Image (spheres, rainbow, N blue to C red):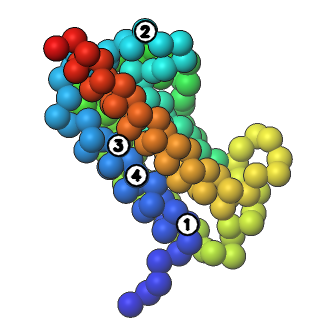
Amino acid sequence: MQNMSEASRLVQMTDQLLSEILNSLTDMSKETLNMDLDIPEVNSLYVLARHVLGSVEEWGLYFGTGHQVQRDRDSEFMASGEINELIEYKNSWMPLLHERASKIDDSQLNNESWRPEPGISIGDALLHTVDHTAVHLGHLQLTKQLIEHQAIRRL
């Protein structure tokens, strides 16, 4: 059996974190997903999930593997919708990210990434997807706790 490349391993870790994010939202109503907590700089659950998906698509597919993507980061912070839209979005590009990462040999990880700014390697870009996704998983968990706390206070 062939060992998994480091690039594939990083993408698999990111995919698992994204699945954890999406799975944690599947029981949420559309209203709860899009709830404005009326706290400065705190985003809705939907916005958090949509932003991290957009980030992984860009950092993983483009900066990590060279596949051009079109991202409108600002619109991620104004997004609203339902969980199935987030799942469909992830499923529209994640298989390609796995496929492209599987073709990256470990010896290529220190090569310059496709990010316009110099100094970021392919490995750096793929590691960023893990790190950024994990950070936002934590944000999402805290936001869910805030929502639950607000619901309890209303009782």
Hey, which residue is sitting farthest bottom in the picture? 1
- Evaluate if marks 3 and 1 touch, with contact meaning CB atoms under 8 Å apart: no
- Picture disc at residue 21: 3
Q: Nearer the viewer, mark 2 or mark 4?
A: 2
Instruction: Mark 2 or mark 4: name the one nearer the start of the chain.
Output: 4
Q: Residue at x 20, y 37 (%)?
A: 26
Q: Secondary structure at mark 4?
A: helix
Which quadrant would the C terminus be assigned to in this image? top left
- Picture disc at residue 7: 1
- Residue 101 visible in this rendered orientation of the protein: no
Q: Identify the amino acid type marked 4.
A: Leu
Spatial CA distance of label 4 from label 1 is 16 Å
| Residue 146 rendering spot, x and y as whole percentages | 36, 25
Q: Is residue 132 above or below residue 27?
A: below
- Picture disc at residue 56: none
Q: Which residue is mark 4?
A: 17
- Picture disc at residue 38: 2
